[in-house]
Amino acid sequence: MATLKERTQQKNAPAPMTPERFAKLCRRGLARRVGLYLEARTDPNAPVDGLTPLMWAAQYNAHPDVVGVLMKWGARENARDDRGRTALILAASTNGNPKVLSELLVHGARVDYRDVDGKTAFDYAQANPAFAAEDLLLLSSIAASVNEAEERGIQIGAERQKSVGGPADNPRIVPLYKK
């Protein structure tokens, strides 16, 4: 039998959210609230207007921990919209917070993916005045590591990035990520 505390928590637990409302929450909300709705079985990958909740968070939410919570609950870091854009490309083009980029990179977002215009996240970050030169160098060095590995026939994914000097062990990204 459930304790009073457990019954109260169950009673106060939120019901799953509609994809539209959840996308709006990811766009503007805090990680704690996003996590509560994910615990209530809200789908972390349900698209709204062609964008996943992770894409909405990466593009508009300045809180990198929202990206982290979505990733923890199974959001696909390299999902693409109808223009070929990933969450990393959207973050680089409009967000302006390098910590959001770092969070995506730590979770295995691919820097070498191109959208339908042939542009990568690095191309968009270069055009975004919010990113400092060191942020651009970081993206560039990760992209170079990925390209070098692929030229050698190494398959890159979240689990493989460490072995080729990817973001998970890059000494420049760890301090940026932890700030």
Image (spheres, helix red, strand yellow):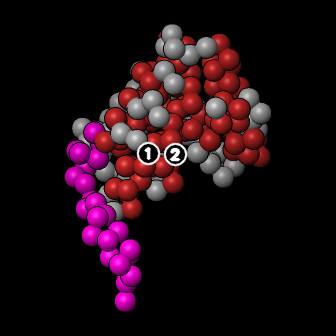
Q: Which residues are magenta?
A: 1-24
Q: Is residue 18 magenta?
A: yes
Q: Amino acid at mark 2?
A: Gly
Which structural element holds mark 2? helix
Residue of label 2 = 68
Location of residue 110 in the rendering, given as x and y in whole percent from the top left corner: 57, 37
Q: Amino acid at mark 1?
A: Ala
**Horizontal side, residue 73 vs residue 83: left or right:** right
SS majority, magenta? helix
Q: Residues within 10 Å of mark 1 (few under 14, many from 20)?
A: some
Q: How many marks?
A: 2
Question: Decide: marks 2, 1 in contact (CB < 8 A)?
Answer: yes
Nearest to the observer: residue 43 or residue 33: 33
Task: Give the residue drawn at x 37%, y 89%.
Answer: 1
| Quarter of the image where one finds residue 175 | top right
Disc with the residue nearer the chain's start (2 vs 1): 1
| Gap in angstroms between the C-alphas marked 2 and 1 | 8 Å
Nearest to the observer: residue 75 or residue 33: 33
Q: Residues within 10 Å of mark 2 (few under 14, many from 20)?
A: some
Residue of label 1 = 31
Location of residue 97 in the rendering, given as x and y in whole percent from the top left corner: 51, 25
Which structural element holds mark 1? helix
**Horizontal side, residue 30 vs residue 127: left or right:** left
**Horizontal side, residue 45 vs residue 142: left or right:** left
Nearest to the observer: residue 129 or residue 115: 129
Location of residue 113 in the rendering, given as x and y in whole percent from the top left corner: 52, 33
**Does residue 76 appear in this view?**
no
| Quarter of the image where one finds residue 81 | top left
Task: Give the residue drawn at x 53%, y 18%.
Answer: 125
| Quarter of the image where one finds residue 99 | top right
Mark 2 or mark 1: which is in front?
1
Location of residue 152 in the rendering, given as x and y in whole percent from the top left corner: 75, 39
